[in-house]
Amino acid sequence: MTEPRRGAGRRALEVTDITKRYGPVVALRGVSLALDYGEVLGLVGDNGAGKSTLISIISGVARADTGEIRVDGRLWAEAGARTTRQAGIETVFQNLALVPTLSIAENMYLGRELYGPGRMATAVRRIDKRRMRREVEEAFDRLGLNMPAVTSKAGSLSGGQRQAVAVARAVLWGSRVVIMDEPAAALGVQQTEAVLGLITKLRLEGIATLLVSHNMDHVLKVADRVAVLRLGRKVADLDTRERPVTGLDLVGLITGAVPGTPGPS
Amino acid sequence: MLQVIRSRRSGGAPRPQRTHSSLRRLGAAQGGGLWVALILLSLYFSWSTGSFFTQSNLLVVLEQVSVVGIVAVPGAMLLVSGNLDLSVGSVAGLSAAMFGEFDKIFGWPMLLSFIGALAVGAAWGTMNGYLVSYLGFSPVIVTLGGYAGAAGLAQTITSDSTRSGFGSLFGQLGNGTLAGIPVPGVIFIVIFLAGTFFWYEARTGRHLIAIGANKEAARALGVATRRLPFVIYILSGTAAALGGLIVTSQLDGASVQIGVGLELQVLTAILLGGVAFTGGRGSLWGTLAGILFIGVLNDGLILINVGPYVADLAVGAALVVAAALDVLYQRLERVPVPETAEATALETDWTAGGEPVAAQRLAGPPDPEASREAGA
């Protein structure tokens, strides 16, 4: 068993009172979430409940109208996709965010290319293509991912392979928080098991994971807590370690059949 | 697990990807196919005229393609990122006309007029870039407006008159030679080589392709989806101004008419070179093949004494053939991976190994701790 890298129970990510409007539509109304290191938080809700908006805000792609985000206890003001990734927060987007006309290696390093080799090359910002290819090959080997050549274009991969690249990219770069938006959407049974296995691994290593899924079984299998969004509000925050939660409970909260109460945090 | 990896390494059955990538490479090499066509065309002209492969003729080809080439380097970067600059011809004319005004009417020193004219092009590019990248206007509409607007502005300022007599030093820009090579050709070669560095050896190329292919993904991954095209628009305007100044020097005449049709020649060369009109795919080397192909075609058809209209016809035909090849390539790209046992194994076999993920991270920046400290 791996020792958690950071003390479990310490806050990795805390979002407070997030509100987001798109014109007249209020996507999020004062949503707060907290996520500890070594914890897996499931986030569920119906279409339009605000899950994707919340993820966009946390991953720096969108900006909240009000509210604040704290990473590792510190206020994260300079929100932006690049700075968020630099803070060790990685996201597997539902659309996977892969560029089909770039190779696997180019996709893995997109937006944070390595410069080099040597000081001269770094000074003129020449990228080290060979090293990036090698690093990706080695990372795939270490993770046990059996993939086509890293110079293959992402567009030539099958759905499962693309998903593998996107998940691997998040897992390999995310040092604090890994956010997964429907990571198993395009996957077969075996690959889904692999993704859920990776999430469990991340937890053991003290990484905070936010898992968004429509599949209650997947969420309940790995999540320590489950937050339920409904119409832009958080209606429940259930700790599955304190009290067992069933898929039926969640469905009730998601649809509004069971009136929720904002839980802990 | 290890065994699977090892069996992959030690070869065994050929991987299904292999055959596909070679097929695909054949299609992807539209630039490559064009290089072959270029060589065949050159051989044909050499055979039919006997004077094609002479040093003087090749230098003529280089000189004739240089203005289009200079503008096509940033042009290809724009197109591959899903952008477009249709205003380059008019901006070349505007810059040339303004050079004439600066030099003859304002009485500025030649060098200052030259820099001023480049600044006019850069300013127009800045406006294009700002409207498209930051305000989200359509590139076609903005630069089509520029196409009409820049020409109209130039005509208004100059009252549609041509200025001439800029002296021998300025004449060197278009007519001089450097080590036996025409100066415009030297400028084109330098700009092209700089372009290849940014396209292939820096992150610029892959970022532009990413913006053109999947803008949302590029943005989410921290690519500068606004700033990068913005900067290239500025370079495009500046390159157009430089092209206009070269022609002004060659003719010793500054006129609005100088850049007429340049945007279409540039776009034709880029598309012929295999950059997708919708962006996301293409190469700068392919663009060079497109530039040279048009240059060789024009030159050779003049050598074998057919009229310039035939050259236009031939360029048009070549563009349609290139478009047909592009469709073929797209079809090839969509060929699904065959459902062989190996392919299935490739896909399903990615369960995590025994090592902690923390020990498996990709090497390289950024160190989150350091960036946190810097950010705080």
Image (cartoon, coloured by chain):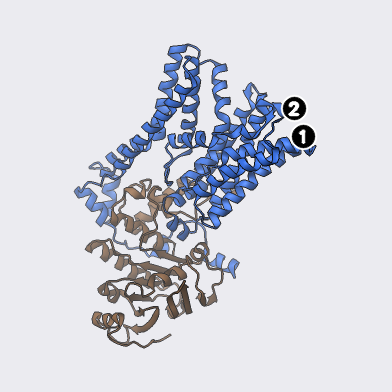
Chain colours: A brown, B blue
Mark 2 surroundings within 10 Å by alpha-carbon count, few (fewer than 14), some (14 through 19), many (20 or more): some
Q: CA distance from mark 1 to mark 2?
A: 9 Å
Q: Name the amino acid type tagged 1.
A: Lys
Label 1 crowd bin: few (<14), some (14–19), many (20+), radius 10 Å: some
Can you tell which mark lies on residue B165? 2
Amino acid type, callout 2: Gly
Which residue sits at x=59%, y=67%?
A: B375
Q: Quadrant of the C terminus of chain B?
A: bottom right
User: Vertical placement of A206 versus B45: above or below?
Assistant: below
Q: Which mark is residue B104?
A: 1
**Which numbered disc, 1 or 2, marks the residue that appears first in the sequence?**
1
Mark identifier at residue A123: none
Where residue A57 appears, as percent x and y from the top left, is 46, 70
User: Element under label 2?
Assistant: loop
Task: Find numbered disc 1 in the image and state the secondary structure of the residue it sits on.
Answer: helix
Q: Are marks 1 and 2 on the same chain?
A: yes
Asked if residue A111 shows in the view, the reply is: yes
Asked if disc 1 and disc 2 are in contact, CB closer than 8 Å, the reply is: yes
Q: Residue at x 19, y 49 (%)?
A: B341
Res B352 quadrant in image: bottom left
